[in-house]
Image: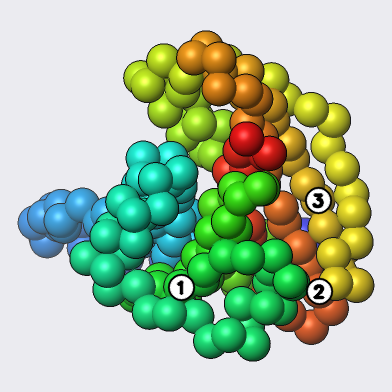
């Protein structure tokens, strides 16, 4: 490396007189237009996922009729029964697939007694998700006067044979309707893209 650096410096010194003469006879270059930094598709996809979770799982759910109306307006498609059963098992519920330029979202609502709204999406690499998710939850809880979030210890379960990081929060509601849970699962199966799952769970009400 030092040899290459020395050769480069030598070449620069040898060319300096030529460069000086050109500088004397040529006008200074005009500044070009400022180049905006390239967009990060993954960052945009994270923002879209959080916007969808806020609109569907925070603002419409647990009103299932309102959630269904929202999904129809956005172009949600019914999830194939075999895929829905793979996600919910034998628990009652409905599922949708939502396609955008950022990819496919798997949206599920598990019916009571355990009323749960979840959105899943795969990413090319594991995104920075936790901080932005917490910000979304805190803004919603504050503006809706829903209570205060409390973070629980991080868990590392294995889901469908794949290692997973699970971030958990409790929300003690101020309206007396009982606690809610919010979850962020990051599952990375061998040979597959990481899956992000955002969950709002009302529990047994």
- For image coordinates 34% across by 61% down, the residue present is 68
Q: Is residue 163 above or below residue 160?
A: above
Circle nearer the viewer, 2 or 1? 1
Distance in Å between CA atoms under marks 2 and 1:
23 Å
Q: Give the quarter of the image for residue 182.
A: top right
Q: Residues within 10 Å of mark 2 (few under 14, many from 20)?
A: some
User: How many callouts does the rendering have?
Assistant: 3
Query: Secondary structure under badge 2?
Result: loop
Query: Secondary structure under badge 3?
Result: strand
Q: Give the quarter of the image for residue 29.
A: bottom left
Q: Is residue 89 above or below residue 186?
A: below
The one of 141 and 95 positioned closer to us in this rendering = 95
- For image coordinates 45% across by 76% down, the residue present is 97
First of labels 2, 1 by sequence position: 1
Query: Secondary structure under badge 1?
Result: strand
- For image coordinates 58% across by 56% down, the residue present is 111
Residue 8: image x %, image y %? Answer: 59, 65
For the N terminus, give its image quadrant.
bottom right
- For image coordinates 63% across by 65% down, the residue present is 92
Task: Please give the residue where the numbered disc 2 appears in the rendered image.
Answer: 189
The numbered mark at residue 96 is 1
Q: Give the quarter of the image for residue 4.
A: bottom right
The numbered mark at residue 165 is 3
Residue 196: image x %, image y %? Answer: 63, 59
First of labels 3, 1 by sequence position: 1
Q: Residues within 10 Å of mark 1 (few under 14, many from 20)?
A: many
Residue 183: image x %, image y %? Answer: 67, 43
First of labels 3, 2 by sequence position: 3
């Amino acid at each position: 490396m030092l040899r290459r650096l020395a050769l480069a410096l030598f070449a620069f010194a040898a060319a300096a007189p030529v460069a000086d003469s050109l500088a004397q006879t040529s006008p200074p270059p005009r500044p070009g237009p400022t180049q905006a930094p390239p967009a990060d598709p993954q960052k945009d996809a994270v923002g879209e996922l959080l916007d969808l979770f806020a609109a569907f799982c925070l603002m419409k759910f647990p009103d299932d009729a309102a959630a269904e109306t929202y999904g129809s307006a956005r172009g949600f498609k019914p999830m194939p029964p075999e895929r829905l059963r793979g996600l919910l098992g034998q628990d009652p519920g409905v599922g949708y697939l939502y396609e955008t330029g950022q990819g496919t979202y798997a949206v599920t609502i598990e019916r009571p007694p355990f009323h749960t709204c979840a959105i899943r999406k795969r990413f090319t690499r594991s995104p920075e998700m936790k901080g932005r998710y917490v910000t979304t939850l805190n803004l919603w809880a504050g503006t809706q006067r829903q209570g205060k979030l409390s973070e629980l210890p991080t868990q590392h379960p294995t889901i469908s044979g794949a290692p997973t990081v699970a971030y958990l929060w409790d929300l003690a509601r101020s309206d007396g309707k009982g606690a809610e849970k919010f979850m962020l699962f990051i599952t990375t199966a061998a040979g597959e893209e990481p899956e992000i799952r955002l969950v709002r769970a009302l529990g047994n009400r």
